[in-house]
């Protein structure tokens, strides 16, 4: 994007306009209390506002700097659309002392996450629940227990068995911009690194991609390693992306869509909180957000985690007690949260 000059002050713009007056112009008193000076400053203010609008507009004309709705318009030009957020649907096992029926508006939850349930239930029988909000954080691991938030007679808890429909986060400007930039080299439909990344990212659930195109399984092979925003991909997601790649890859290429090798990382933090700081459980959630945000093949750096937590505000200091240093992984591996402990 071209470098734009800084905006002048009102007085600087007023003096610039005075320079346009012809020599011998009968009125040249720019005093702010004179009628001429008032109108001159109104014209200068209008010019400044027009230039300020231009400064706001120009970055939106380029994919690398556009944001929000402007970036969406660039995406439409290539037939792309921003991935929208959606809620999660889970299958759970009922832990109850007797059969019953969920009352209207029944809510269950863990932490600040809330889920709706409806219909009859019986001990050890499966039921489905729907998240009240949207996003990948509602994709709970098997074994997580949802406790009643509203009174449900006879019900102790629901134990998560499977994520039937995963929640998806709304695509950020940075993620959409990356897809847009990848879309250009992918237009040739060749078996390029960028083409495989672009094809994989078309699926709403895929947020992390690593393409290994140096013949990982022999001559003519390519591995497309994918993952959702949190955790590992489901077999259904792998199969979906494999079908897309198979439809577009050259006939001579053996392309395999697979999950990354998980690398569990346990984390122990000691926080020195300021008054009014969020709870320790909230800080544990922030640490999990950081770990889940790591990309395939990305190294864990304690200093980056500390910066991430400090950016939230409310902390005097952060101590990363474990791990003791950076944790590097192979390019087809993904760090996933292990045991995360936060205390003061």
Image (cartoon, helix red, strand yellow):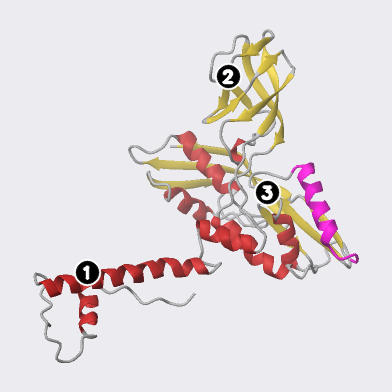
Q: Residue 72 versus residue 26: which sits nearer the camera? A: 26
Distance in Å between CA atoms under marks 1 and 2:
61 Å
Distance in Å between CA atoms under marks 3 and 1:
50 Å
- Which comes before the other along the chain, label 1 or label 2? 1
- Which comes before the other along the chain, label 3 or label 2? 2
Question: Dot 1 corresponds to which residue?
Answer: 42
The x and y percentages for residue 8 are: 28, 74
* Residue depicted at x 68% and y 38%: 166
Q: Does the magenta stretch include residue 244?
A: yes
The x and y percentages for residue 173 are: 55, 57
Q: What stretch is highlighted in magenta?
A: 234-252
- Which comes before the other along the chain, label 3 or label 1? 1
The x and y percentages for residue 31 are: 10, 75
Distance in Å between CA atoms under marks 3 and 2:
29 Å
Question: Dot 2 corresponds to which residue?
Answer: 106
Marks 3, 1: nearer the viewer: 1
Q: Can residue 51 be seen in this view?
A: yes
Q: Residue 344 versus residue 95: which sits nearer the camera? A: 95
Predominant SS of the magenta segment? helix
Q: Give the secondary structure at mark 2.
A: loop
Q: How crowded is mark 1: few (under 14 residues within 10 Å), some or many (20 or more)?
A: some
Q: How crowded is mark 3: few (under 14 residues within 10 Å), some or many (20 or more)?
A: some
Question: Dot 3 corresponds to which residue?
Answer: 204
Q: Is residue 240 magenta?
A: yes
Q: Residue furthest bottom?
A: 23
Instruction: Say if mark 1 contacts mark 2, CB within 8 Å.
Output: no
* Residue depicted at x 70% and y 54%: 202
* Residue depicted at x 51% and y 51%: 305
Q: Residue 259 versus residue 102: which sits nearer the camera? A: 102
Q: Give the secondary structure at mark 3.
A: loop
């Amino acid at each position: 994007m071209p470098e734009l000059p800084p905006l002048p002050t009102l007085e600087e713009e007023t003096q610039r306009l005075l320079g346009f007056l012809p020599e011998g112009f009968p009125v040249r008193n720019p005093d702010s209390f004179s009628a001429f000076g008032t109108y001159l400053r109104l014209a200068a203010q209008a010019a400044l506002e027009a230039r300020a609008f231009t400064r706001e507009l120009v970055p939106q004309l380029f994919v690398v700097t556009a944001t929000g709705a402007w970036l969406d318009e660039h995406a439409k030009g290539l037939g792309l659309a921003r991935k929208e957020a959606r809620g999660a649907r889970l299958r759970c096992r009922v832990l109850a002392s007797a059969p019953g029926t969920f009352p209207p508006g029944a809510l269950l939850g863990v932490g600040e996450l809330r889920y709706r349930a409806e219909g009859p239930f019986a001990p050890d029988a499966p039921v489905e629940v729907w998240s009240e909000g949207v996003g990948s954080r509602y994709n709970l691991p098997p074994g997580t227990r949802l406790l009643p938030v509203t009174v449900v007679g006879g019900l102790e808890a629901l134990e998560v068995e499977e994520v039937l429909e995963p929640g998806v986060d709304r695509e950020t400007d940075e993620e959409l911009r990356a897809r847009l930039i990848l879309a250009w080299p992918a237009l040739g439909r060749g078996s390029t690194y960028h083409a495989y990344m672009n094809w994989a990212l078309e699926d709403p659930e895929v947020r992390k991609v690593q393409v290994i195109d140096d013949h990982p399984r022999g001559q003519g092979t390519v591995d497309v390693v994918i993952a959702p925003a949190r955790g590992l991909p489901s077999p259904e997601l792998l199969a979906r992306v494999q079908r897309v790649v198979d439809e577009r890859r050259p006939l001579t290429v053996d392309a395999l869509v697979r999950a990354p090798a998980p690398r569990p990382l346990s984390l122990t933090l000691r926080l020195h909180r300021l008054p009014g700081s969020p709870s320790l459980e909230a800080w544990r959630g922030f640490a999990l957000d950081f770990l889940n945000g790591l990309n395939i093949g990305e190294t864990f750096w304690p200093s980056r985690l500390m910066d991430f937590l400090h950016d939230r505000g409310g902390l005097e200091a952060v101590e990363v007690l474990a791990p003791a240093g950076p944790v590097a992984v192979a390019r087809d591996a993904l760090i996933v949260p292990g045991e995360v402990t936060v205390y003061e």
